[in-house]
Image: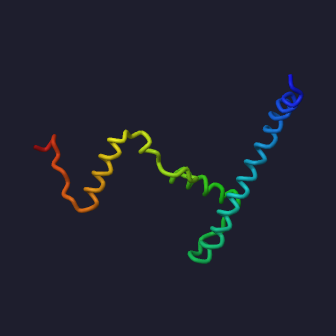
Amino acid sequence: MNPRRFWKRRYMLPLGIVLAPLFIALFVYVAGGIVMLLWNWLLPPLFDWPRITLLQGFGLLALCRILFGGFGRGGSGHSKHMTPEERERFRQRMNDRFCGAPPPARENRLDA
């Protein structure tokens, strides 16, 4: 076995076990701190709302992530599952709907 590979394997797992919680704690501290500072800078003077703590700032960030979904993955990804024909039909329907063309007649209506 290559000595370099041996040392890499031997120390990577313990290093990951030690560093992962530190990076998580750093993220909680920085992200929660940014939200806390922005909240405490804007909302108490404007609306007379209470000031929040660091953990409340991170909790607010997590709540917004749950409710609104996104740390910036970019797009919802629905068009990835469409074929090119479906994508073109979707674009045409959106263009017809929002650019003033009359809606097409439905072929199978239930209220007939």
Residue sitting at x 73%, y 48%: 24
Camera-nearest residue between 96 and 17:
96
Residue 5 in percent (x, y) is at 84, 29
Residue 34 in percent (x, y) is at 68, 63
Left or right: where does residue 87 sit relative to residue 16? left
Q: Residue furthest top?
A: 1
Q: Which quadrant does the C terminus fall into? A: top left
The picture quadrant where one finds residue 53 is bottom right
Q: Residue furthest right?
A: 3
Left or right: where does residue 77 sit relative to residue 29? left
Residue sitting at x 67%, y 64%: 36
Residue 83 in percent (x, y) is at 37, 39
Left or right: where does residue 30 sit relative to residue 1? left
Q: Residue furthest left?
A: 112
Q: How many marks?
A: 0
Camera-nearest residue between 53 and 99:
99
Type of colouring: rainbow
Q: Is residue 41 above or below residue 87?
A: below
Residue sitting at x 65%, y 73%: 41
Residue sitting at x 27%, y 51%: 93
Camera-nearest residue between 22 and 76:
76
Q: Is residue 20 above or below residue 98?
A: above
Residue 45 in percent (x, y) is at 61, 77
Q: Which quadrant does the N terminus fall into? A: top right
